[in-house]
Image (cartoon, grey):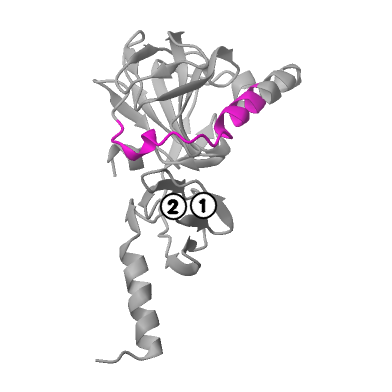
Amino acid sequence: MKLSFFTFLFLLHLQILSAVEFKGKFEQGSFILGKTDPDSKVFIDKRKIRVSDQGFFAFGLDRDRKNDVTIRIHKDGKLTTIYKKVLKREYKIQRIDGLPPKQVTPPPEVYERIKKDNKLIGKARSLDTPYDFFKDKFIYPIEKYIITGVYGSQRILNGKPRRPHYGIDFHAPEGTPVKAMMDGEVTLAENDMYFTGGTLIFDHGHGISTLFMHMKDINVKVGQKVKRGEIVGTLGQSGRATGPHLDIRLNWFNVKLDPATILNLN
């Protein structure tokens, strides 16, 4: 049977689509894992992203993203464009009272310190390394916990609305061992940041990083490779914290993602 030119193009398009797989829900705050031919070039919206030797790639969707995602796959001189609708989420309102006034509205004398902290965190999150650890299953950083804060919730501190919370808070006794959620490289290890206290950032490749804050003890250093499940420190209440807990964050470069999307909490 002879195929028309348009039928041929349609079948070719289906063939290319079948060679692209996604894992993750296309909704605000989500981590998305993709897999395609290793020789493909992948663009998310207008950004070219890294594809691993096995064809894995990763990206994320901002908390307040309003537009659909445009994914372009270039392979053997052919272009396939995929459009994915991004679902909207509803977020909780969280009220926290009793914080010291200087931690709700920092005094001017600490602005430079905060600026320096943010610069260090931004640098650690900007790395685009070829690691592809992100493709494997992440684990919980502690074994026994109570979740006291969730991603996206709007925080009202001492009655004053503040920016949303971008992590998950795990309450547990101070000194509880904290484990690396995935293989990676330590890109930041600071004992005393103004807001986050004892802070760790792990690079898992392709711009995907996890951050732990409010640590009591830190047992690793910058440049050190860690394995999933390895003890990296202990839970504390350093920085801006009303009690002992571990606040974990997930990023795709500077895009703040919901850690629940790598822990199957949703």
- Tell me: 46 left or right of 24: right
Q: In which quarter of the image is residue 7?
A: bottom left
Range drawn in magenta: 117-138
Position of the C terminus, as image quadrant, is top left
Calculate the distance from the C-alpha at mark 1 to the C-alpha at mark 2: 6 Å
**Residue 220 position within the rendered picture, expressed as x and y whole percent measured from the top left:** 45, 11
Which quadrant does the N terminus fall into?
bottom left
- What amino acid does circle 1 point to? Asp
On the question of residue 258 being in view, the answer is yes
| Rendering coords of residue 87 (x, y %) | 40, 60
- Residue 28, numbered label: 2
Mark 1 residue crowding within 10 angstroms, few (<14) / some (14–19) / many (20+): few
- Indicate yes or no whether the magenta region holds residue 126: yes
Residue 18 picture location, percent across and down: 30, 65
Q: Residue at x 33, y 73 (%)?
A: 14
Residue denoted by label 1? 64
